[in-house]
Every structure is written in structure tokens, then in C-alpha cells.
Amino acid sequence: MSTPAVLARQVHKNFGPNHVLRGIDLEVAPGQVQVIVGPSGSGKSTFLRCINHLERIDAGRLYVDGELVGYREVHGKLHELRPQEVARQRVRTGMVFQHFNLFSHMTVTQNIIEAPRHVRGLSKSDAVTLAHDLLAQVGLADKADAYPAELSGGQQQRVAIARALAMEPKLMLFDEPTSALDPELVGDVLAVMRSLAEGGMTMVVVTHEMGFARDVGDALVVMADGRVVEQGPPREVLANPSTERAAKFLARVN
């Protein structure tokens, strides 16, 4: 049996009195596309941020590629890693956010080469070559010298994907990557994500795009009220949910 790409065991997260994650159990196999759906406020984005230790968990265990995320366990107790150790862990995980978070004062190429040069230690020429290859991969080879303000939202999101890929991650996390886009721009971003999936990239995708979940996802999780209320093959879950909570949500979005 191969080591899970992501393994969550009874993960809890609180924001003050608000119990946002209430015992999440989830396993993602290498090369799998795991899609997470659910109503707003169900904890989907918080869970994704916990995978990258952008949020600390309050109980449970989270592993990426067999390594405990954000903590060291000693005699059953968790001790948070130092920032540089967390940064080392994050290198293997790319994350694409709802809002693109590009540096507005940098060209597209400069945005992409920043982390490979300073974190991976690539030379400028190697990083630029990598950036141009990735821009071609996401269909933006002609935008290398453009600034973010000169691009559409969909183009900016594809640059953000290229920037994440420049770190050569083993896992890609997508936090509602199309929700801030005009409807006519969504397809280009989903096409890039579909191409990544076909290439074998392990992906955890929080989205409201049910067509993507059905056609590209290997597994589908429905979250509500901080819990996993349903999980299984996407077509089965979408067509015939077995829980009332999942059925109620899916009836509104399908």
C-alpha cells in the first residue's frame, strides 16, 4: 500500500468559540483528485488551509506524504515546528487561492520566478526558462512580460497556477479557484486543472463547479457544519446521496 498523499484523522479547528472543523477524517491517494463541496461556512477552506499549516489544528493529526504537518509528536504530544521547518514542508504543496495574490508591481515572469530563485535556489536563467515553460502549459506563453493589471481574472488565475507549479509540488490545493471569475472565464482555468489531473498531479479542490467534480474528480466529499457528511465516487454521490444533509445541499446546486 502506498503512503497517502494526505491523511486527516479527527482534525478539529476552533476560532474562539466557533468550532469550525469537528473531527475531519479524510484520505487522499497519490495521483487522486479529491473534490470537496458544501455550503458556505462548512469548513472547506479552513480544512484546506490546515493541510498547508496556514491554520493550526486544535486536535487530531494531519499528514502529507506520511509526514506530520506543522508539528512534531513526542510521547503523544504535539509540538509546533519552527517557522523555517514549516516553510520546508510547504515547498512540496502548491496552493491556489480564490483571489490571485499576484505581485502587482512585477511582470508575470517575475511573479513566477520569485519563489524558485529564493526558495529552490534556481539561477535566474533556469527560473525564467521554467516560467516560460509553465506559461506555455497554462496557455499564456504570450503574456510573459505583462503585468497582472493587464490580464483578465482568468488569466491571472492561470498565472497563479503556474506560479504554484514552479515549486514542483507533489500536491496541489485549490481553494475555490473560479469563484471570483466572470462565468465566461471559468472554463480556461478548469481546463488547466483538468490537464494537471490528466498528468497525474495529486489535487484537493474546494469548488462549487459540480461539472468538474463529476468529470474530473476521483472522489467527492460533501462537508456541512464542520463535518464530512458524505463521501464516495463523484457520480454516485451527485446522483444518489445517501444522507439527508448532502441531498439537501446537492439539490440546490445540481
Image (tube, grey):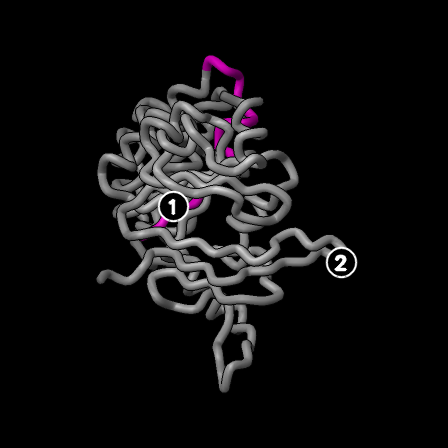
Check disc 1 and report the residue beneath it.
172
Percent x, y of residue 73: 48, 79
Which quadrant: the N terminus? bottom left
Q: Is 242 left, or right, of 169 in this rendering?
A: right
SS category of the residue bearing label 1: strand
Q: Is residue 151 left or right of residue 128?
A: right
Name the residue rendered at 45%, 45% in the picture.
Answer: 95
Nearer the observer, 109 or 224: 224
Q: Are marks 1 and 2 in contact (CB under 8 Å)?
A: no
238 relative to 167, above or below:
above
Residue at 42% x, 63% y: name it. Answer: 63
Residue 161 lies left or right of residue 11; in this view the side is left
Residue 122's image quarter? bottom left
Residue located beneath label 2 in the image = 16
Whether the magenta-drawn stretch holds residue 176 is answered as: yes
Residue 156 within the segment the image draws in magenta = no
- Amino acid type at mark 1: Met
Which range is magenta? 170-184
Front one among 182 and 64: 64
Which is closer to the viewer, label 1 or label 2? 2
Whole-number angstrom distance, CA of label 1 to CA of label 2 = 29 Å
